[in-house]
Amino acid sequence: MRVLVAEDDFHIRQGLGEILQNEGYTVVLAENGQQALTLFSQASPDFICLDVMMPEMSGYDVCREIRRINAKVPIIFITAKAEEIDKVVGLELGADDFIVKPFGVKEVTARIRAVSRRCLQRQENVTQKITAFPMADLVVFPEELRARRTNETIDLSLRDIKILQLLYERSNQVVRRDELFNRCWGIDYLPNSRTLDQQVSQLRKRIEHDAKDPQIIQTVHGVGYRYTTR
């Protein structure tokens, strides 16, 4: 899933890009409104994070132009303004949500996941839809970015879903580390030996009964990981 982030502040732009990349998205960055409009046409993002106050074209003007082309692509406005009138204008232009600066990682992650669920659930091509699948006593719902166990609901990132889906597809087989990187990070990603282990460690804490004795994501030392059906 590709996300366009348009923000003129370098640090905020890079920060949002890092948050999104850590979640498993492909990120395209724009530093002004005109560049955002150009990249929208070139990159065809699945959704957009759009700063309101930008040079060359404001976020509102960019949104108007995008809505003439595509009425459905989700747009999240990034704004330092908390006044009600600004949100009213944004909603009238077709905004799906707002991120108000300054913001925290957890807030951004929650809003991004909410918009991603709507993107996944309204995909028009049914063949692209990913159906729910079981792993041990867990059921993973890719379109919801969630898993469920009895009455427990577990929020997952897009990358978490990719990892679990690949392990499920290759049940009872070892999935090598390089394959996990290629499928879940992308072939252009330069892997760090600890990146995958840290991601799996955090994922285990959420989905395993005992993260120290994992039953869903099993380590095959020196090779990769495996999910074993029982």
Image (spheres, rainbow, N blue to C red):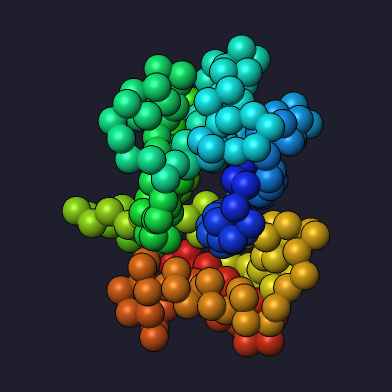
Q: Count all numbered tags in the image, as a single digit.
A: 0
Q: Position of residue 168 (x, y in %)?
A: 54, 57
Given residues 81 and 173, the one toward you in this image is 81
Q: At 62% from the left edge and 76% from the top edge, which residue is drawn?
A: 195
Q: Position of residue 145 (x, y in %)?
A: 43, 48
Q: At 47% from the left edge and 64% from the top edge, which residue is drawn?
A: 229
Given residues 77 and 24, the one toward you in this image is 77
On screen, residue 80 versus residue 29, left or right, reads left
Q: At 32% from the left edge and 26% from the top edge, which residue is drawn?
A: 85
Residue 126 to residue 211: above or below: above
Given residues 105 and 207, the one toward you in this image is 105
Residue 49 to residue 153: above or below: above
Q: Position of residue 22 (x, y in %)?
A: 56, 62
From this viewpoint, is residue 146 visible?
no
Q: Position of residue 21 (x, y in %)?
A: 60, 58
On screen, residue 4 versus residue 23, left or right, reads right
Q: Residue furthest left?
A: 151
Given residues 47 and 211, the one toward you in this image is 47
Q: Quadrant of the N terminus?
A: top right
